[in-house]
Image (cartoon, coloured by chain):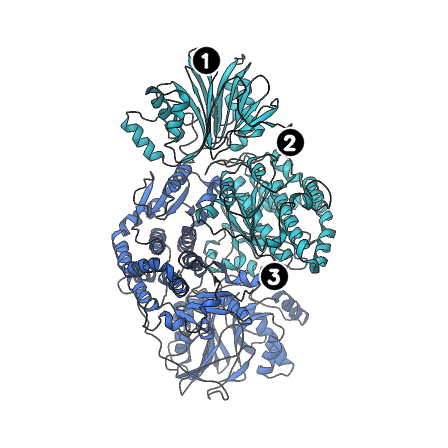
Chain colours: A cyan, B blue
Amino acid sequence: MCGIAGIAGIHDIRQALTTALERLEYRGYDSAGMAIHSAGGIDVRKSVGSVATLAATLPPEPVPGSGIAHTRWATHGAPSTRNAHPHLSYDASIAIVHNGTIRNIAELRGELDDLGVSAVSDTDSEVLAHLVAWHRGQGADTETALRLALARVDGDYAVLVIAADRPGTLVAAADGSPLLIGVDGRAVHIASDRAALASECTHYSHVLDGEVVTITTAVPAGRDWKPASRESGWQGKGSYPNFLLKEINDQPRTTRAAISALFSPIAPGSPADWSATLDRPSIKRVRFLGCGSSYYAGEVSASFVEQLARVPAAAEPAAEFIQRRPVVEPDCLYVLISQSGETLDTLHAHRYLRRHPVQTLSFVNVVGSSLDRDSGASIHLRADKEVSVASTKVVTNMQIAGLALAAWLARADYGARSAELLELDLALPILPTILADLLAGKDAEIRAAAESVHAYRSMYYLGRGASWPVAREGAQKIKEISYIHAEAYQSSELKHGPLALVDPEHVSVVVAANDDSGNQDATLVSQIQARAGNVVVFSQHQTCEFGATTIRLPAIHPLLDHIVMGVALQLFAYHTATILDRDVDRPRNLAKSVTVE
Amino acid sequence: MCGIAGIAGIHDIRQALTTALERLEYRGYDSAGMAIHSAGGIDVRKSVGSVATLAATLPPEPVPGSGIAHTRWATHGAPSTRNAHPHLSYDASIAIVHNGTIRNIAELRGELDDLGVSAVSDTDSEVLAHLVAWHRGQGADTETALRLALARVDGDYAVLVIAADRPGTLVAAADGSPLLIGVDGRAVHIASDRAALASECTHYSHVLDGEVVTITTAVPAGRDWKPASRESGWQGKGSYPNFLLKEINDQPRTTRAAISALFSPIAPGSPADWSATLDRPSIKRVRFLGCGSSYYAGEVSASFVEQLARVPAAAEPAAEFIQRRPVVEPDCLYVLISQSGETLDTLHAHRYLRRHPVQTLSFVNVVGSSLDRDSGASIHLRADKEVSVASTKVVTNMQIAGLALAAWLARADYGARSAELLELDLALPILPTILADLLAGKDAEIRAAAESVHAYRSMYYLGRGASWPVAREGAQKIKEISYIHAEAYQSSELKHGPLALVDPEHVSVVVAANDDSGNQDATLVSQIQARAGNVVVFSQHQTCEFGATTIRLPAIHPLLDHIVMGVALQLFAYHTATILDRDVDRPRNLAKSVTVE
């Protein structure tokens, strides 16, 4: 349950909430809904699918007033109108929207059953509506009722409530999930993130963990207000058929922006800037934490740090890190990676780390996001807004940030390795040009390879050494947007079990970097072909012959080559998905930013 | 190319070579063949499939003499009679069998083309036959010709050659792949491993790396002979329909054998025994290296070491370890894991480590195998012979060995943690009984769950924390024997991309250990069901309700529970595969022991 918004006192509440929901849609697009105060009580409208679908069902005439709204990513119960938010309480006295997960839902449902209240939906959130209504029925006011209900919840939440008998008033509460209040001099806005606050807002304030706030049209008193900077303009998809292809093709520009800033001695975003609060001598190892593609970008970054700076480095899924109650090592730099800066698992890991005296650094794309704000030091990824759910240009810039960190670690302590750093400095400016050439010059060839494989339902992506996380990200991408079951394996592991799947209905994508394992990669291809498996090789070897469909890619620098390979695999995933006629910008089941556990 | 054997001077050469091949079949069963000296030159017989198929084609009458034989696991070229060994040279003057991989095969083929010699098969090995024949044609004797040919090979090999004009003589050479000579007082035997040497052999000697030896019926002079111990008797599958089910059901007995030895203060195999050469104080971290299921057993072992001994531990695929040219850490204990002790990737890792002043320990099941022999310290897994290609009882005992190592590390240095060790000591003797109860009491329920999922082609296995490697091994097993594309994911990662695959045609197996994440696992099940995905839960939570098919398993001890879970997942894979009518003992494409790169 993903993005929530509320507004008190505006001339066209439906239109204002619709705009807020559109900006929240990256957090989920399974269903959308809104509840506004009306003469007869509470007017609830919901629909399955995108905000546009909901908007089409709304009466056109403006209605002034207050209301709450929600865009959903399903966690409990299928995407359906019944499970869409807002949820009305059993007596229709209140409506609620909720972002978060209630872990002890079975227990709470049992207690409500004992009170004679049955839930109508499968969601965990609805239970909260009933609990609040029940406490109100016992005589509590809405704010107190919400406090009492939330005291029973094990989980994270950001929640908004309106009551039929309190027009013009919203009650908000948060713990673990972000929630912001914004003011524009007339109305009061509230939303899951800054981007969703109306652009007219001049100041904003965070709802603190555990806080419950009553919102009316008056500016809430006693809060810590920060000035809101103007949001950078929304970018359309131009002449591209979808945002994904546009964003893949943004990369010559966005990589140049990242390289110019992150490797510059003086520009804003330069190492002098983001490393100011870091103490290099006490960093003996580095651990990258992220989720999904950010985790894989962390793995690529870890290999950059090990190879360039010879500092031991590893990556781990952010939620797994918490799960194992890790020993937090004081000589370790922890790097948290999130495009949106709102990924809940990553925020949790950061919160866990903040309780320890360790150095942390964030890689974030959205400036001013929760993670960016909470971090002592951040590298901003400078990839501009990314709209498509499958991350491409941001993942690439995460790897460039990893490389910038590796170079900083190497430069600060290892003067003797300056030859390698010089080589990197010379190659870096070429990268955007190489990517532009690749996107233009290899597109047809990569599309032809995608044509040859799109009908298969099962794939391996095989890489060794530093190519292994590149293969993992490649497999993740094609899985996300084409729904083909692609799995990454270390090349050397294939024969130790997974080879059993290889047959004429199976495709292996071999990720062959330009290292000294060309003959091993040729042997790998032979082993697959000996079992009649299909093979596509993405090769940076300049001389090896594989006897299989081979996309030859340039080799410019042993580290940068992995970034080039990653972009080629994005294009391959893109073409495979479009040949299959998938909605590449909004793949099924996913959300751009996962703001629940 | 997998198992080779040769014999000089025996009364029934076909029968003797057949017996040797049967014992080598665990190294591959794609094709088999033999070449014997005959009056007209060299008599070559080959067939696709098992040794039994070959044996059925052989004339029944005994022929005395000499010959070479091969059982194949295809790496270059499909399994076919044309690609089966032995390979005759272009002029039929010599025949060759080869175990290993020739990496520079393209180069050598090119050189032969220039000499006017074309290969007829797709194998790398055939090229070697032509090279030897060509050098002989230039006047070299067979031994010299073989030396000259091998000097051009980049790769590992064990190779046997017979020449039409030298009846009664074999030439053998090895580098990187094991090859042993055995003598029984009458004939001279040669084979890839000790198990394949005739049981009459009284002494054996290793062919050294780089050595070329000419073998006749005389005992080869000047060698280092070791007495051969009697091989433990071959065990049949009893009343079980296949070896896999027999070996799964062996586990109450084989775990008891491992526990009795590895945790005893005095028995052979006790810590006092295998730890004698280890220096505990200098061990600050542990790294497990293995391939396939041995690698996953290493991951489980690493979590045991971290949890029980609080010593940082990790696992890595053995070939990946070599690939990245690791910094070998002097304070790290490296543990090499291999059932057969002949896995080439693991032997390579061990060889790499031996060049450094570090402590190593091996977990091996086959006593006297290459790895066992070369290791300073070994834990013998005591699971008896494992015949089925998919490892079950040995993988379980690998985890018990990991636990024994963890307990030894904890006991030696952390007296304060004795309460935890006492708890483990109390629970350990119960484990075999719990497994026996599980195998008898849960079989029908697990089979019913397998019935419900066997028709799906795509699966996830989801685990968190220490359950993640358990899920990986579970997915590997079902992939190996049922050919269903099962992939393991960390539970927390599902929503960060892989969820896109979930639909009514997809099954998720949730591995839910008895830790405090029961509510999180329930949320995970909800997220999958919200996308109409199928779910089977293997749960050790005693109270959680999942609203999905749930196999409830006992919880006896936080570490041992993972071993119990592993056995339940073996049984699930077994039933799924038999319902699909797979050959569970000999899954397609695989070999019991992978003796090539």
Instruction: In this rendered view, identify the residue nearer to me: B394 or A380.
Output: A380
> Which residue corresponds to mark 2?
A237
Q: Position of residue B337 (x, y in %)?
A: 44, 65
Q: Is residue B69 visible?
A: no
Q: Position of residue B226 (x, y in %)?
A: 43, 83
> Which residue corresponds to mark 3?
A517
In the displayed structure, A67 sits above or below B148; it is above
Indicate the chain on which mark 3 is placed: A
Q: Can residue B579 be seen in this view?
A: yes
Identify the amino acid type marked 3: Ser
N-terminal of the two: label 1 or label 2? 1
Identify the amino acid type marked 1: Ser
Pointer 1 and pointer 3 on the same chain: yes
Query: What is the number of the mark on residue A38?
Result: 1
On the image, which quarter does residue A61 sit in?
Answer: top right
In the displayed structure, A225 sits above or below B382; it is above
Q: Position of residue A373 (x, y in %)?
A: 58, 36
Q: Position of residue B254 (x, y in %)?
A: 31, 65
Total tally of numbered discs in the picture? 3
Label 3, residues with CA under 10 Å away: few <14, some 14-19, many ≥20: some
Q: Residues under labels 1 and 3: Cα distance?
A: 70 Å
